[in-house]
Image (cartoon, rainbow, N blue to C red):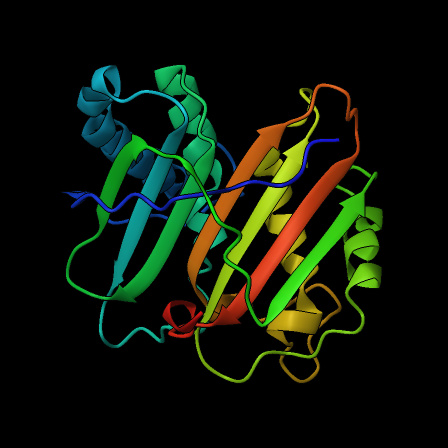
């Protein structure tokens, strides 16, 4: 059975984006939210396309989101909501698959994007180093429950930013970006929840450093294995 794999983060100086990063929009087609999302994806696509002919697989994408100083860094502006539907649009636009996708957010005047060939690296570990298995569709509550029930021993990380990496092993029929949001929503035991929040409203705005990785196992079918590595931001270098 294929085991989860972690890939290196692109360390290139990214290209500066000219369009403000847009969060995923579930509004109707033609809405302002959809227009912002499409313009953002087009800007990222224009930035990375010239680099792809000289960039071999496996491919990694890095997105560094710059937020205004007055915008709270640890609430809302969830990183996975910038990456989806951006990454599926990039895949359709380039014909290339991404094995690793990274995002950060910080207070800055600009946002950057970089693409590079990547390579496997040592397991990053973390205060939480967990592995879960799912069989349900990611569009169902059953998927979230399966993850939640396998991490019940976890306690929320201390207040502050969180570095999270998720390494997926999926079958060839799974579109792995479809798993990101549902997986992170299931991590309330690690991320915490605000008082009175609903079951799947984890404090995912605390994630300021996110790495997502994927390998394909042709024999896996609808089963998914996910390695979860989480720690407070700033402790990665101490390991």
Residue 138 seen in the figure: no
Q: Position of residue 156 (x, y in %)?
A: 64, 78
Where, by quadrant of the figure, is residue 140 drawn? Answer: top right
Residue 203, by quadrant, is bottom right
Query: From what the image shows, is residue 237 above or below residue 135?
Result: below
x 20%, y 24%: residue: 51
201 sits left or right of 220 in the view: left
Q: Is residue 5 visible?
A: yes
Q: Position of residue 238 (x, y in %)?
A: 40, 73
Across and down, in percent, residue 131 comes to: 72, 53
Which residue sits at x=40%, y=14%?
95
Q: Is residue 189 above or below residue 140?
A: below
* Residue 64: x %, y % from top left: 28, 53
Identify which residue is drawn at 42% across, 68% down.
236
Residue at 54% of width from left, 84% of height from top?
A: 158
Q: How many marks?
A: 0
> For this rendering, which residue is in front, 34 or 179?
179
Q: Quadrant of the C terminus?
A: bottom left
Q: Is residue 176 above or below residue 236?
A: above
Indicate left or right for 127 with 140 as reference: left
* Quadrant in the rendering for residue 235: bottom left
The quarter in which the N terminus is drawn is top right
In this rendering, position of residue 32 left or right of residue 67:
right
The answer to which of 218 and 199 lies nearer the viewer is 218
């Amino acid at each position: 059975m294929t085991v989860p794999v972690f890939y290196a983060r692109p360390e290139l100086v990214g290209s500066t984006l000219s369009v403000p990063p847009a969060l995923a929009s579930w509004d109707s087609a033609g809405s302002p939210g959809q227009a912002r999302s499409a313009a953002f994806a087009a800007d990222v696509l224009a930035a990375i396309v010239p680099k792809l002919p000289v960039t071999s697989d496996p491919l990694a994408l890095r997105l560094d989101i710059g937020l205004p100083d007055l915008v709270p860094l640890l609430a809302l502006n969830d990183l996975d909501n910038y990456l989806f539907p951006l990454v599926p649009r990039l895949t359709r636009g380039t014909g290339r698959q991404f094995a690793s996708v990274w995002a950060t957010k910080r207070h800055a005047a600009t946002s950057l994007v970089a693409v590079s060939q990547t390579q496997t690296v040592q397991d990053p570990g973390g205060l939480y180093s967990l592995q879960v298995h799912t069989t349900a569709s990611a569009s169902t509550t059953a998927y979230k429950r399966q993850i939640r029930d396998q991490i019940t021993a976890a306690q929320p990380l201390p207040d502050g930013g969180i570095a999270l990496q998720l390494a997926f092993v999926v079958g060839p029929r799974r579109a792995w970006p479809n798993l990101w949001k549902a997986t992170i929503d299931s991590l309330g035991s690690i991320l915490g929840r605000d008082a009175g929040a609903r079951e799947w409203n984890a404090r995912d705005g605390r994630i300021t450093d996110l790495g997502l990785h994927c390998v394909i196992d042709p024999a896996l079918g609808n089963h998914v294995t996910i390695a979860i590595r989480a720690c407070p931001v700033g402790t990665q270098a101490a390991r």
